[in-house]
C-alpha cells in the first residue's frame, strides 16, 4: 500500500495519549510520527518548505486502535468478507492494526499456510496486520517453528471451533503450553459441557429453539471450567497467556490487577458486545447477537465493565466475524455465531465515556 510522503503538522488538537488528554501538536514525517508536544519551536520544524499544516482546533486526536481479535474470512470464506473489505471497515472505524485468527479455509495450521495469509494481506490490507498461528491436537512441530518477531501469537481453541482446530487432548495442551515460542491466545469454553447442554436443549426445543437458550448452552460453567484450566496450565509452565473474549463474572476471580500490565504473564480481554448487551436483548436481537462465548446476564456484563475499569481486564477487542444476513436469519441451531463489529468499536467505546459523564 502507498505510504504518505512529506511532512505534516497537526495543530491545536486535544491529544488523547498514554492516559492523558492535552492540547498540542503532532509532527509527522512520511509514515513516522516524529514528535508529540504541547509546544513546538520554529527551529524544530525547519526545513518547513514542504510542511503541510492541518489545524484541528476543537477536535480530538486519538492513536489508531489495535484490535487483537478479528476473523476477516480470508481465505476460503470470502463470500462473507475478505482482507480488503474488512481492513477498509477497520480504518473507517479508527482501527489501524488488526490481528486475524487462523480458522479460515484452509486452517492456518502450518507455517506455509500462515505465510500465505501474510502475503495476501501485504497486497490487500489497508491497515497494519498480524496473524495468529493455529493450534490443533497434532501440529506441535509446526507451532514451535513460529517466529515471535512476526507472529502475534498461537491461537488455541479449547472449545468451539471449526475444522481440525479444537484442542481437547490434555497431552497436546501440555505440549503447546510448555513449548510455544510466543504468546498463547485461548478461546475458553469446555466442549463436553457445551455438548451436554446442546443435547438437552435440542431435545426440549428441536429446530424451533429460541436464541435465548444460547447462554444456557454455552454456559458460565463451560467458560469457567476452560478458563481456569488455561490459567492453571499457564502458571505451571510460565506461559505468556492471553484469554480472549471473557464473558462471565466468575472468570474475573482468575485475574490479578495488583501486577503492572508490563509485568503480567496472564492477560485478559473483553469484547464490545459483552460490554453492551445482556441476555434480555435476545428477545429483540435474536441470532444477530449470537456470539461464542454467549452474551450472558446483566450482572456478568457489569462485572466485566468493572474489571475493565479496575485493571483486571487489559484489552478491548471486537471478535469481528461477519456472516451473511441469510445465514444469521436461519433457525437458532443452524445460525452461525459471530457478527461484524470492527467499524463500530471505537464509536461504542466513546459512547461509554459519554454515558459515564
Image (cartoon, rainbow, N blue to C red):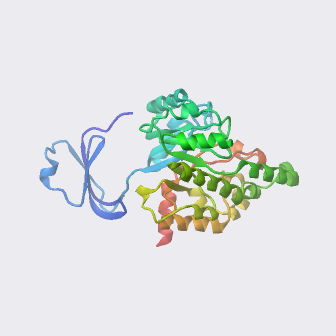
Lateral position of residue 133 relative to residue 61, left or right: right
User: Does residue 71 appear anywhere in the picture?
Assistant: no
Q: Position of residue 190 (x, y in %)?
A: 70, 51
Observer-nearest of 335 and 271: 271
User: Looking at the image, which is closer to me, 258 or 353?
Assistant: 258
Q: Is residue 345 visible?
A: yes
Residue at horizontal 54 percent and vertical 35 percent from the top: 143
Residue at screen point 51% across, 54% down: 266
Check the image and name the residue furthest to the left: 43
50 lies left or right of 96: left
Residue 200 locus on image (x, y percent):
84, 53
Residue 262, placed above or below residue 71: below
Q: Along the horizontal axis of the image, is 19 left or right of 98?
A: left
Name the spot of residue 18 as percent of width and height, x first: 35, 59
Quadrant assignment, res 336: top right
Residue that extends furthest to the bottom in the rendered view of this protein: 357
* Residue drawn where x is 68% and y is 35% of the image: 163
Give coordinates of residue 3: x percent, y percent. Answer: 33, 36
Is residue 108 found left or right of 219 in the rendered image?
left
Q: In this view, does 189 lie above or below 132?
A: below
Looking at the rendering, in which quadrant would you find the N terminus?
top left
Total residue callouts: 0
- Residue 300, compared with residue 158, is above or below; it is below
Amino acid at each position: 500500500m502507498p505510504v504518505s510522503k512529506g511532512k505534516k503538522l497537526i495543530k491545536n488538537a486535544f491529544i488523547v495519549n498514554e492516559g492523558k488528554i492535552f492540547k498540542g501538536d503532532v509532527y509527522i514525517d512520511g509514515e513516522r510520527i516524529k514528535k508529540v508536544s504541547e509546544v513546538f519551536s520554529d527551529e524544530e520544524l525547519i526545513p518547513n518548505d514542504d510542511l503541510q499544516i492541518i489545524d484541528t482546533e476543537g477536535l480530538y486526536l486519538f492513536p489508531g486502535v489495535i484490535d487483537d481479535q478479528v476473523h476477516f474470512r480470508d481465505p476460503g470464506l470470502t463470500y462473507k468478507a475478505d482482507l480488503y473489505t474488512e481492513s477498509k471497515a477497520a480504518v473507517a472505524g479508527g482501527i489501524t492494526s488488526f490481528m486475524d485468527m487462523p480458522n479460515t479455509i484452509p486452517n492456518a495450521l502450518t507455517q506455509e499456510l500462515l505465510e500465505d495469509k501474510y502475503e495476501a494481506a501485504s497486497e490487500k490490507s489497508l491497515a497494519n496486520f498480524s496473524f495468529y498461528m493455529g493450534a490443533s491436537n497434532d501440529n506441535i512441530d509446526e507451532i514451535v517453528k513460529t517466529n515471535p518477531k512476526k507472529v502475534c501469537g498461537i491461537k488455541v481453541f479449547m472449545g468451539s471451533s471449526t475444522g481440525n482446530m479444537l484442542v481437547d487432548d490434555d497431552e497436546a495442551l501440555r505440549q503447546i503450553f510448555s513449548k510455544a515460542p510466543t504468546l498463547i491466545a485461548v478461546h475458553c469454553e469446555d466442549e463436553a459441557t457445551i455438548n451436554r447442554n446442546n443435547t438437552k436443549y435440542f431435545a426440549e426445543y428441536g429446530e424451533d429453539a429460541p436464541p435465548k437458550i444460547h447462554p444456557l448452552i454455552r454456559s458460565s460453567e463451560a467458560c469457567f471450567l476452560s478458563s481456569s484450566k488455561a490459567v492453571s496450565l499457564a502458571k505451571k509452565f510460565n506461559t505468556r497467556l492471553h484469554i480472549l473474549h471473557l464473558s462471565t463474572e466468575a472468570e474475573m476471580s482468575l485475574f490479578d490487577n495488583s501486577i503492572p500490565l508490563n509485568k503480567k504473564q496472564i492477560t485478559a480481554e473483553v469484547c464490545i458486545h459483552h460490554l453492551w448487551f445482556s441476555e434480555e436483548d435476545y428477545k429483540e436481537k435474536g441470532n444477530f447477537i449470537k456470539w461464542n462465548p454467549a452474551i450472558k446476564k446483566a450482572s456478568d456484563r457489569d462485572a466485566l465493565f468493572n474489571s475493565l475499569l479496575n485493571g483486571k481486564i487489559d484489552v478491548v477487542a471486537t471478535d469481528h466475524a461477519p456472516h451473511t444476513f441469510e445465514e444469521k436469519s436461519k433457525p437458532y441451531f443452524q445460525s452461525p455465531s459471530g457478527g461484524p463489529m470492527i467499524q463500530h468499536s471505537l464509536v461504542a467505546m466513546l459512547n461509554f465515556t459519554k454515558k459515564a459523564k
